[in-house]
Amino acid sequence: MEPVFDVVGIGNALVDVLARVDDAFLVEHRLVKGSMCLLDAERAEALQRAMGPAVERSGGSAANTLAGLASLGGRGAFIGRVGDDRLGRVFADDVRATGVAFTTAPAADGAPTGRCLVAITPDAERTMSTLLGAAAELGPDDVDEAVVASAAVTYLEGYLFEQDLARQAFDRAASAAASAGRLVAFTLSDSWCVDRSREEFLSFVESSVDLLFANDHELRLLYGTDDVDEALGHAERHCRVVALTRGPAGSTVASGGRRSSVAAQAVEEVVDTTGAGDLYAAGFLFGFTRGADPATCGRLGAAAAAEVISHLGARPETSLAELVAPIAPT
């Protein structure tokens, strides 16, 4: 049966709170530049107050990827847990406004809708501090197996993988996708996540993942080696496709025993790297679900990532479909 959706994403349903800070702010608040850490409610409220004026936008890594996919003209759905509160309604309305299907019912009890505090330093690096809230309570009962079976690819977010309930949800989604003859994509998301739950990540990648997204540091951590080519070789033995991002150095796509090097797309000014990996995955998956070759998938990812790092925030601000028209598969 032809898929209804190109991609269904499962991940953290969060509202991003973005503010510009200096490096001294990171030192003062004991934040590691470029990393992601989890906060409890008390610390999240204190840090948000200290950040000062900020922009609020619906976010979450997999949700950003689906928004990018929709901007490219792809058909996407998202599964994530929000609270029955103002931010939950903002998130749901925002996701649907991008053209992405979102039918997960809000939780009537439990934690409030989560948020991600994004501190952006003058070098455009983003440091994220996250209160997962309701997002962390996503479990197997939230996975609509019919939606998973109707998507060509199920895309799973590593940021959420550390939560026990979410891991059960991922197992259920991966099983439903496999039973329907669909593919599973997984992003390692952050080296901090990989380092804390390396064995669990490794087991899931080797047992359930067809398409793997990672940067070079994350992949080296996953396989316990300083040699990125060795790590890539390990990943190739288990995954049909591995998309390895290298920041300004571009990306390497490994598929079918071959590796393709893809240059990063130049931008006039890097404003905010938030969402670069998310939008790379959006472009890549858009090409992949249309039968594009690996190098073209990588170029589509690079183009989408270049757009999002040229402005504040992790969602595209222009039509990605128009932007990639010269290289997009027909």
Image (cartoon, rainbow, N blue to C red):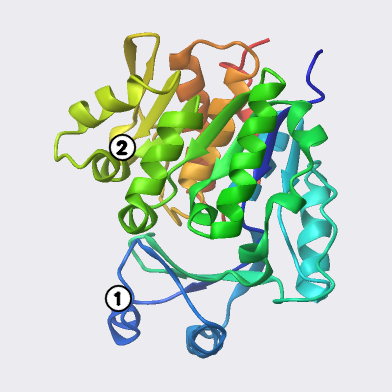
Amino acid type at circle 1 is Asp
- Does residue 201 appear to the left or right of 324 in the view shown? left
Q: Residues under labels 2 and 1: Cα distance?
A: 23 Å
User: Can you say whether 291 is above or below 96 in the image?
Assistant: above
Amino acid type at circle 2 is Arg
Res 174 → quadrant: top right
- Does residue 128 appear to the left or right of 86 in the view shown? left
How busy is the neighbourhood of tag 1: few (under 14 within 10 Å), some, or many (20 plus)?
Answer: some
How busy is the neighbourhood of tag 2: few (under 14 within 10 Å), some, or many (20 plus)?
Answer: some
* Mark earlier in primary sequence (2, 1): 1
| Residue at 57% from the left image edge and 84% from the top image edge | 41
Say what secondary structure mark 1 lies in.
helix
Q: Which mark is residue 23?
A: 1
Q: Position of residue 197 (x, y in %)?
A: 37, 54
| Dot 2 and dot 1 residues touching (CB under 8 Å) | no
| Residue at 46% from the left image edge and 30% from the top image edge | 207
Say what secondary structure mark 2 lies in.
loop
Q: Say which residue label 2 marks.
A: 246
| Residue at 43% from the left image edge and 53% from the top image edge | 273
User: Can you say whether 40 is above or below 253 in the image?
Assistant: below
- Does residue 112 appear to the left or right of 44 in the view shown? right
Q: Which mark is residue 124?
A: none
Residue 321 in view of the camera: no
Q: Position of residue 142 (x, y in %)?
A: 75, 52
Q: Quadrant of the N terminus?
A: top right
| Residue at 43% from the left image edge and 34% from the top image edge | 205
Q: Quadrant of the C terminus?
A: top right
